[in-house]
Amino acid sequence: MKKLIMLLLFLPLLSFSQDNKKDKKEEIKKEIKKVFKFSTFYGAVNGGTSLSDDDIYSISTGTLSQDVIETPFDYSIVFGLRKIARFGYEPKERFKRGTENSFSDAATIGKITGFEFLFQHEYKRQQGSTYFDFHHFLRYVANDWIAKIEYLRDGFADIEYFEASQRYRYKFNRKFSLNAGFVQRFSEPYGFDPLADWVLENGSLHYTYLALQEGYEINPFTEVYTDPNGNVVANSNEVWEEVIIPQVLDNYVESERNKLPIQWCYSAVIGFDYYHYTDDFWLHSWGNLMPYHLDLGSEYSYHKFNNGQWLDYSGGLIFGFKFNRNLGIFIEGKYNKYWNREWHDFSIGANYIIF
């Protein structure tokens, strides 16, 4: 009887506990659906012709020889997940291929307040070189503050960094706002030059000794050049200097950089954002400036390579104007300069509809 009474007393509590667990699960499911609502997962394989083959002629002991530098076709394998609201000037795409150059992705503030994200991976071969690029970011925009974390690796531009920022936002109206806050970044020690020790007094680079140190061998009588594994890589001085030496230098620089620890950089940031859109005229612009960077006294800090403070900045502009139903012009572009490394994209043009 006592057990029965205890069971009857605790049964409502157990039922209440189960109901709470169900409610929490339902709330979690709703939040997950809210986060991924309108997001798009995409994947694509793209390809095309690269640089044409290049013929190199050389004369050795009176004999003409020909070498052909072949560049394989370009391709890219892209996959990603994104949730970024389209601005009014952006057309709706039937399919996401990953090759689109969406300048607005670099904007500090999105079209809507709330949570947005991008996770994109791309493995590609471009002009004979292969890269594995990333672009990830998480962004939350509120009425009076902004938080964002971003990871970018662009092999063709030779830039890679992680960045987190927290900013206060002041809105003058629905179109224009200013922001200010702090940025934390880490990257490889930009400014460090592994080839500096190989520069001669006359300013030229002693690449031959460097190649020998890396395990390459040269037979001056037969003009046979072999790599550290004994494979023949060139049969003429022209191919050796124009093809193999650039590869040796690239591999050496990458190897020396990878030996060094990553560098943290703490900076102050100020920025602005402006967005106006109508069917006939639109203007979207943004900018960010980092004028001050905390000196941590690291051996490979960019302060030492630059002898003090420097300016890092980025910005973008998207402009469009339709004169009438037939004629319109557009200007689109973005520009970045971090640690005196620059990468940018732009597009300028006009459209005229004949009929």
Image (tube, grey):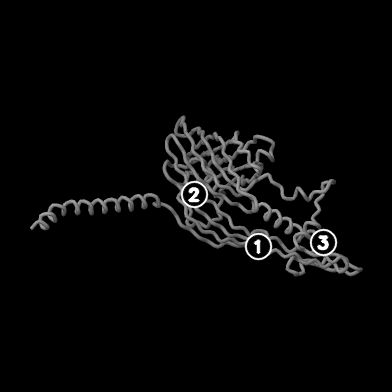
* Horizontal side, residue 178 vs residue 70: left or right: left
Question: Is 262 situated left or right of 229 in this image?
Answer: left
Please say whether residue 349 is visible from this viewpoint: no
- Disc 3 element: helix
Chain-order first, disc 1 or disc 3: 1
Which residue type does callout 2 highlight?
Pro
The residue positioned farthest toward the right in the image shown: 62
Pick the residue in front: 71 or 138. Answer: 138
The mark found on residue 49 in the picture is: 1
Q: Give the number of the mark in front: 1 or 3.
A: 3
Image side of residue 128 versus residue 264, left or right: right
Q: Nearer the viewer, residue 9 or 324?
A: 9
Residue 303 location, quadrant = top right
Q: Estimate the spatial distance between the alpha carbons at disc 2 and disc 1, rounded to whole Å.
A: 28 Å
How many residues crowd around disc 3 within 10 Å: few (fewer than 14), some, or many (20 or more)? Answer: some
Q: Position of residue 132 (x, y in %)?
A: 59, 58
Residue furthest to the top in view is: 172
Distance in Å between CA atoms under marks 3 and 2: 50 Å
Nearer to us of marks 3 and 2 is: 3
Label 1 vs label 3: CA separation? Answer: 26 Å
Where residue 36 sits in the image (x, y, percent)?
40, 52
Q: Is residue 350 above or below residue 15?
A: above
Secondary structure under the numbered disc 1 in the rendered image = loop
- Which residue does the numbered mark 3 point to in the structure image? 238
Q: Position of residue 53 (x, y in %)?
A: 73, 64
Identify the image quadrant of residue 313: top right
Q: Is residue 338 visible?
A: yes
Label 3–label 2 contact, CB within 8 A: no
In percent of the image, x 45 and y 55: which residue is there? 40
- For the residue pair 173 and 219, the one nearer the viewer reads as 219
Circle on res. 91: 2
Assign a secondary structure to mark 2. loop
